[in-house]
Image: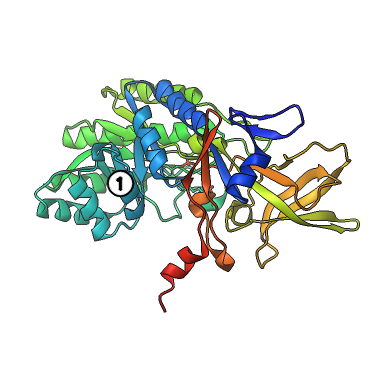
Amino acid sequence: SRTVRRNADGVLTVGGLDVAALAEEFGTPAYFLDEDDFRARCRAWKDAFGPGADVFYAGKAFLSRAIVRWLDEEGLNLDVCSGGELATALAAGMPAERIALHGNNKSAEEITRAVEAGVGRIVLDSFQEIVRVAHIAERLGKRQRVQIRVTVGVEAHTHEFIATAHEDQKFGIALAGGQAAEAVRRALKLDGLELIGIHSHIGSQIFDMAGFEVSARRVVQLLTEVRDEHGIELPEIDLGGGLGIAYTSDDDPREPHEIAKALGDIVSRECAAAGLSVPRLSVEPGRAIVGPTAFTLYEVGTVKELEGLRTYVSVDGGMSDNIRTALYDAEYSVALVSRTSDAEPMLSRVVGKHCESGDIVVRDAFLPADVAPGDLLAVPATGAYCRSMASNYNHALRPPVVAVKNGEARVIIRRETEEDLLRLDVG
Ligand code: LLP
């Protein structure tokens, strides 16, 4: 994050505020999100792709009303994948035509709400959905702009749970076996649909450009086939999200301008070769925009030294505010941020307070040997898929998200309370 620093006493500051004061004011655990950094990343993506393309922020990474307003102000569009995300986007005033609706099993209610609101596109994920969306649109007297999501058959080098373009998984319609071409044929016949393009998302936390390039090439190939068969040129392609970020110093992420250039070059080259006009490109980064902009602040509660093994440092959150370590073997770093220490580094495992051994926040970390109850630890790069995947396991209260800007901190999502939990429990 851009405005996170250490002051002269070694205490972490964000936007000029020191973490001890933040912990005092907002409690722990809490996520602190750097608004300037978020906006700067939005602008970097917009500038990289330029006026001939659209950047749809993937709301699943983290969404709130403040986020929607910032996106709107920065000129980004928004990808939502559920009725809940759509409701948040609309409640915060995102113009519907800049919203895309995703999902492999959208309910009739979600589709209806999206069509009624006038979303800019619905991304169709199955043969049933082609018909379902067409019928709903016709019933509402509308013609809905849609893209068809295809699976291009590349193996993205990432964790199995977040790879989405190989053949044996639930998303999209396969290019293989002429499935996608058949989907296009059916969509073109339906009055309720205006087929504007093809969509491909190959996975998430990806560093290698090769997968994106193959995906771009195969999508353009389909546009060529559509032109040859139907005599029409689909005007848009969306190449999804998935650009990886640095969770630890071992990761070496690509910048938005690198992916923009790689994709732009391939699409232009392939289109030129096929004699197609270059379609309008869009992308859907989530993690790469919001991930690096936030850190989680925890307080240490207990320290247990296991002779010859490692030291377990328990913090006041855990898998309820960051499930990624348990779910994907994700790697994070951690730092003691409320003071400096000259103590020797000691092999530590930062764990949460939940009732299972898999409740690990940072699997392997070196913390100063004098780390003690009351110390504050920060885990960086928790802006994406941490609050958005947070749970109430063990009736944990989900932490707040605090936005920091120009030396001011304000809560954008408040901490849950026991009343919040009990309000849902109506038995
Ligand atoms: N577009 C589509 C259609 C997607 O399915 C996704 C992510 C994105 C865009 C944004 O991908 P990003 O740029 O954030 O990588 N919970 C997992 C990540 C799941 C991603 C799901 N789809 C994690 O914590 O790593």
Instruction: Name the residue at 41% across, 40% down.
Output: 66
* Amino acid type at image mark 1: Ala
Instruction: Identify which residue, 38 or 329, lies in the foreground.
Output: 38
Q: Secondary structure at mark 1?
A: helix
Q: Horizontal and vertical percent for residue 217?
A: 39, 31
Report the quarter where the C terminus lies. bottom left
Q: Horizontal and vertical percent for residue 329?
A: 64, 52
Instruction: Name the residue at 48% across, 39% down.
Output: 242
Q: Horizontal and vertical percent for residue 113?
A: 23, 53
Query: Which residue of the protein is positioned furthest toward the right in this rendering?
Result: 307
Q: Horizontal and vertical percent for residue 112?
A: 21, 54
Instruction: Identify which residue, 398 or 11, lies in the foreground.
Output: 11
Query: Which residue of the protein is positioned furthest toward the left in this rendering?
Result: 141
Vertical comparison of 362 with 356: above or below: above
Report the quarter where the N terminus lies. top right
Question: Mark 1 Cα within 10 Å, few/some/many (few <14, many 20+)?
Answer: few
- Residue 26 appearing in the image: yes
Taking the image as shown, residue 53 lies to the left or right of residue 14, namely: left
- Total marks drawn? 1
Taking the image as shown, residue 113 lies to the left or right of residue 212, namely: left
Vertical comparison of 67 with 125: above or below: above
Task: Tell me the residue that label 1 is attached to.
Answer: 91
Q: Write down the quadrant of residue 341 in the picture.
A: top right
Q: Is mark 1 within 8 Å of ligand 1?
A: no
